[in-house]
Image (spheres, rainbow, N blue to C red):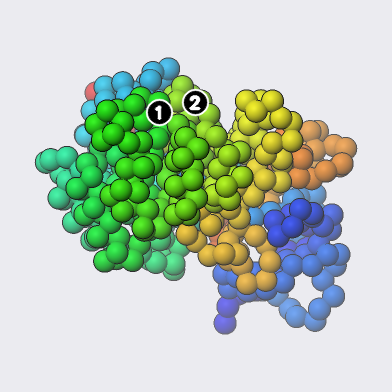
């Protein structure tokens, strides 16, 4: 028998249309939502568990569409540098020394932070991915994972082999909470012939691809110098876009690039904070949305953000595009919420209903304390969450029908142990 839960007296934001219930209930059976309704539950069913959500908002869990979880270990180590210098002189030498165990503990720290701030699904592109998958499996979070691939010797071939092995071992594992994508890092780290091999592997395994594209102006200039075309056009030429593709960043994309992305239905992970911090620029989000592209929000790694806080990402996505477009109507609060929930799920090639609270949807939901000064008066829940809300308001988290966080305590993780192990790891890596 699957366990059933009734959540009552909740203020509910279902994310199926631009409205909410001031008082409602949610029925959950197993890992799925059975019913969402307004007012009090009038049915006759009995439940294994009844949760009183008085004073709380219940909404879909947030979906982080781009990141490198274990990079939390580099948080605060090298800041205020441009992307290439930061990668080559700071990140890569430390990452070279990381073992699977280091990455396991780094990912645990990242998951702890994500769970406590309301993220229920995250994306990762890194290496030693068995360590990442183990951390996901144990913690109860949902994740879309890629073994990052660099297409230069000596590890180019190994990256392809390990990607295949990783997909066979972990795709749909952890009760289906883990799915796998192929993760060629970027056109500047994966030459065209290598990308063609990735395309073949993607066909063989029937898996989508995620890649960093057009993050900086320098990257686009270099691509035009080396290949005569922009990174987006180059991806069309190598056949990458014939496969379902998630492109991270897309900050420096031309109108022609956006046309190409639209033609192939390329999904985009928009990372406003990381792009700002690395001085990369502001992605032309409005143009991409106008062309009907599917766009989700991401934090990117914590070394370029420096947190994994999707509430900040929502708020900044809504704010920045108003500012740069001199348009207060651009990216309204509801659109920001959609990018962090429903659109995020689509961006990651996950189930249609994930990111909503409706019958049949996976039961990934978060509870927020609505008794905060900045949530008064109660004019508009949607505006409050995006323009005033904070990740620290998250009190409880359910993923796949299981309570993972209760009263701000993560039930599946030993918080003190994670801080200790992360510190030990860093003592060794940075010695
Ligand atoms: Zn990235």
Mark 2 — residue?
Answer: 281
Query: Which residue is farthest left?
Result: 154
Can residue 83 be seen?
A: yes
* Residues at marks 1 and 2 touching, judged by CB atoms closer than 8 Å: yes
Left or right: residue 206 compared with residue 306: left
Q: Which residue is mark 1?
A: 216
Q: Reply above or below: 226 against 58.
A: above
| Image position, residue 225 (x, y; %) | 27, 28
Left or right of residue 221, residue 10 in this image: right
Mark closest to the chain's N terminus, 1 or 2: 1
Q: Which residue shows up at 49% across the image and 42% down it?
A: 258
Gap in angstroms between the C-alphas marked 1 and 2: 7 Å
Q: Judge from the rendering whether residue 36 lies leftward or rightward of residue 229; answer left or right.
A: right
Q: Which residue is painted at 47% across and 53% down in the image?
A: 263
Instruction: Estimate the x, y position of residue 324 in percent, counting from the top left.
Output: 62, 25
Residue at the (80%, 38%) spot, across then down: 375
In the shown orientation, is residue 2 left or right of residue 203? right
Q: Which mark is residue 207?
A: none
Q: Nearer the viewer, residue 63 or 364?
A: 63
**Residue located at (15% from left, 50% from top):** 157
Q: Position of residue 297 (x, y in %)?
A: 54, 43
């Amino acid at each position: 028998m699957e366990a059933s839960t009734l959540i009552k007296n909740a203020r509910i934001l279902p994310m199926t249309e631009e409205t909410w219930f001031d008082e409602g209930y949610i029925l959950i059976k197993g890992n799925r939502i059975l019913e969402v309704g307004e007012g009090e539950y009038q049915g006759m069913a009995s439940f294994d568990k009844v949760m009183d959500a008085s004073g709380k908002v219940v909404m879909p869990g947030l979906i982080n569409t781009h990141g490198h979880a274990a990079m939390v270990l580099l948080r605060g180590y090298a800041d205020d540098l441009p992307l290439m210098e930061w990668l080559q002189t700071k990140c890569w030498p430390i990452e070279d020394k990381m073992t699977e165990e280091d990455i396991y503990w780094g990912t645990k720290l990242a998951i702890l932070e994500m769970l406590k701030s309301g993220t229920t699904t995250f994306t990762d592109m890194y290496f030693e991915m068995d360590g990442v998958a183990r951390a996901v499996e144990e913690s109860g979070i949902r994740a879309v994972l890629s073994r990052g691939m660099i297409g230069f010797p000596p590890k180019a071939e190994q990256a392809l082999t390990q990607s295949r092995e990783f997909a066979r071992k972990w795709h749909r594992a952890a009760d289906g909470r883990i799915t796998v994508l192929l993760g060629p890092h970027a056109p500047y780290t994966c030459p065209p012939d290598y990308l063609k091999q990735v395309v073949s592997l993607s066909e063989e395994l029937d898996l989508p691809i995620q890649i960093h594209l057009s993050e900086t102006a320098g990257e686009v200039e270099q691509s035009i110098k080396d290949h005569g075309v922009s990174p987006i056009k180059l991806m069309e030429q190598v056949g990458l876009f014939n496969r379902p593709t998630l492109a991270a960043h897309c900050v420096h994309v031309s109108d022609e690039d956006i046309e190409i992305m639209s033609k192939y239905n390329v999904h985009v992970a928009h990372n406003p904070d990381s792009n700002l911090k690395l001085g990369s620029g502001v992605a032309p989000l409005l143009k991409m949305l106008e062309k009907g592209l599917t766009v989700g929000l991401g934090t990117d790694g914590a070394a370029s953000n420096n947190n994994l806080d999707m509430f900040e990402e929502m708020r900044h996505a809504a704010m920045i595009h108003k500012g740069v477009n001199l348009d207060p109507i651009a990216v309204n609060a509801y659109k920001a919420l959609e990018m962090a929930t429903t659109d995020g799920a689509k961006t990651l090639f996950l189930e249609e209903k994930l990111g909503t609270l409706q019958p049949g949807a996976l039961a990934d939901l978060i509870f927020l304390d609505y008794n905060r000064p900045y949530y008064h008066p109660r004019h508009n829940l949607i505006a409050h969450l995006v323009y005033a809300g904070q990740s620290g308001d998250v009190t409880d988290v359910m993923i796949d029908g299981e309570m993972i966080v209760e009263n701000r305590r993560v039930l599946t993780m030993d918080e003190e142990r994670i801080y200790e192990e992360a510190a030990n790891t860093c003592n060794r890596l940075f010695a």
